[in-house]
Image: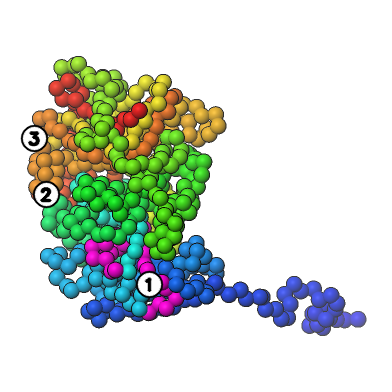
Amino acid sequence: SIVTAAAQADTDRQSPPPFNDVPQEFTAKVFEKNFIKREEMIPMRDGVKLHTLIFIPKGVKGAPMLMGRTPYNAARYEPGMNGDKFLREGFIRVYQDIRGKYGSEGNYVVTMPVRGPLNPTSTDHVTDTWDTIDWLVKNVSESNGRVAIIGNSYDGFTAAMALLDPHPALKAAVPVGPLLDAWMGDDWFHYGAFRQMMLGYVHMQTGQRGEGVIAPSEIYDKYEEFLRAGSVSGYAASNGLDKLPFVQRLLEHPSYDAYWQGLAVDKLIVARPSKVPTLWTQGLWDQEDMWGSNHVWRALKAAGHEANNWLVMGPWNHIQPWAGGTSIGPMKWPTDTSYQWTNEMLLPFLNEHLRNGPPANLPRVTVYNTGEKRWDKFTTWPTACDQGCGTKLKPLYLTANFNLSFEQSAQANGGDTYTSDPATPVPFLPRPVVDPFGEFGATGGLGSAYDPWSKWLSTDQRFVAGRPDVLVYETEVLTEAVRVQGIPIADIRASTTGTDGDFVVKLIDVYPSKDYTNPSASGYQLPIATDIFRGRYRESFEHPTAIPANKPQQYRFELPNVNHVFQPGHRIMVQIQSTLFPLYDRNPQTFVANIFKARPTDYKKADVTILRSKAQPTAILLPVVK
Ligand code: PG9
C-alpha cells in the first residue's frame, strides 16, 4: 500500500517505545543558591548613590562583612550557586561599583586623588568607603558590625585608600598588588619609563562608563603599531585616545611632579598611619603592580608602625594570588601557593580580626622562597641591605669577557658597548605582542589574566639574549648555593653618545643545560628581578636633566624583592639593555623637554658603554645571606 510521509511520521511517533530522547515534559530539580542577594544604591555624603551588591549566606547571624570596591563591575563578582569560599566560611560579601562606573552614580576619575589640591570636591575613596561602611553596619542586620576591605590591584588601591580615615567598624584590610605609586613602580611608569601599553587600559576604562568596548586596531602586533606611531602622543592621536581626559593628563605629567607625588598612596598612608590590621600582599612576578605592597610596608616599618602591618609576597603574577599558584613558567611549586595564602594566612587573619577567632600568628613577613620552593617566615625584611640589616649587600661585579664575579675588577679601563637603536627596540615579549587591554585581551574580562602578558616577567630570556643590543654577563656554573633575601640594587656606571637613555637590568637564574625530570626547564633563563630606569631622572625624579654625552654617569636603582636561592649547577646572569618595547615607550636618546611629545627626528641611535673598571665599577648589589 502507499503510505504518505505524514502518515508514516504519525506512526513513528506513536510506535512504542517512542524513538525520542526528549520527553514531552521534564522539569529538572532546582537547587537554590546558598546565599541571598541584596542590591542597594547607597547614598554618599554628597547625595551620589553607589551601586552595591550584598551577598548574605542563608541563615547567618552576627556575620562579618568582607567588602570590595571596584571599577570593574560589581555584578561580575556575583558568585555561583554555592557561593564563594568566603560565603561558605560565613562571611557576608559586599561589592560596590566605585563612583562613576557601571551602576554607580557620579563621576569617574582614574585612581581618584584624595580631597585637596588634586581633588577639589568634597568626596574621595576615603569618604566613599567611610559612608558605605557606615550604611552597612546600620542596614545589614545579619552582620556583626565588623568589616574588612579586600581587593586586587585597582581594588587593592581602593582598599588601601580606606586606611586614610578608617571607619571604626573597619577591622582589617587586605590590599593585594595595590597600585600605590603609579610613577615609581606600579601601573603607569617604572622610574619614569612610561608603560604605554596601559593606554589600551585607559581606552577600556574611560571610553565609557560601563563595559569596556575596544575599537579594533588595524595592526595586530603592538610592537609594529607603537613603532609606526612614533611617540606616545603620536600613538594617542592616531587612535583618537588624545580625546580622553586621563590621557591628556598623562601627556602633561611625564615627571614625578606634584600630580604624581600627590597620588602616591604609600606616602599618604605613612603620613597618616592607621591602626587597622593590614595584610599587604603581592606577587614576586606581578606584571602590573610590583611596588605598592612592599614599599608601603617598608615605609610603615621605618616609621615605627609595623605592629599592625604584615607583608606576604608569593610566587605569583598579578592574578595568581587568587588561583593557580602552582607554577611560574615551567617551574613547578610542590604546593598550591594561592590556596595556602587563602587558607593559611588570609582566613585566619580575617577570623582573628573580624570574629575574635584564635590569633592568626602570622609572621611579620612571609615570602615564598623561589629557589627552595617553600614559604619562609621572617621577623623583619629585608634580611640584607645597605644599612640597618646586620648583613650588607654584596656587589656582584660585571667583569671582562662578560663574566660576573664577587671580586672587583682591578682593570684601569674596561667597558662593553652596544648600540641602542630606537628603530629596533628590544621586545619585552616574543612578537607578535598582543595588547592585554585591547580588542583581543580584553574580551571576556580584564586583560591581566591574558597570556602571555600575565607571564612576561618570568618569560625565558633566551629569546633576546643573542641580540647585539643586549649585554649578557654570567657566572661560572655555581658549585655552592647563593641565597638572596631582600632588594637587589642595580648600580650602573655607563656612558652614552646620546643625551638621554633608559637602562633595563634583569637578574636571572639560569637553569642547568639539561633537566632530565623537567626538560622544558633546561637552560631556562628565569628573570627573578627586572626593572627599567629612565636616565634623565638619575639626579632627580622631579627635575630631569640631560645626560652629558660620553661622560660616565651613575644610575642606581632598586630592583624588585627576591627571596631566592641560586642552586649549585645553575648560573647567575645579568642582562642589560636600553628598551623593553612596546610595554615601555622608547627613549629618543636625545634629551627633550617631554618625551611623550618627541619628534621623529629626536629618536637617535646611541652607543652605550657599560663600564666595569676599578674606578667605574658596575655591579648588582645582592642581598646575599648565609
Ligand atoms: N593593574 C590594573 C590597574 C590598576 C590601577 C590603575 C590601572 C590599572 C588592575 O589590575 O586593576
Residue of label 2: 542
Tell me the CA gap for discs 2 and 1: 44 Å
Crowd around label 2: few <14 · some 14–19 · many ≥20 (10 Å):
some
Q: Residue at x 22, y 18 (%)?
A: 409
Decide which of 37, 167 is in the foreground and name it. Answer: 167
Residue of label 3: 548
Q: Secondary structure at mark 3?
A: loop
The disc, 2 or 1, on the residue closer to the chain's N-terminal end is: 1
496 left or right of 195?
A: left
Badge nearest the viewer, 2 or 1:
1
Spot occupied by residue 456 in the image (x, y as percentages of width and height): 37, 45
Badge nearest the viewer, 3 or 1:
1
Q: Residue at x 40, y 68 (%)?
A: 65
Q: Residue at x 29, y 80 (%)?
A: 43
Spot occupied by residue 585 in the image (x, y as percentages of width and height): 24, 48
Q: Is mark 1 within 8 Å of ligand 1?
A: no
The answer to whether any part of residue 221 appears in the image is no
Q: Quadrant of the N terminus?
A: bottom right
414 left or right of 136?
A: left
Which range is magenta? 139-168
Q: Quadrant of the C terminus?
A: top left
Which numbered dot is residue 145?
A: 1
Q: Secondary structure at mark 2?
A: loop
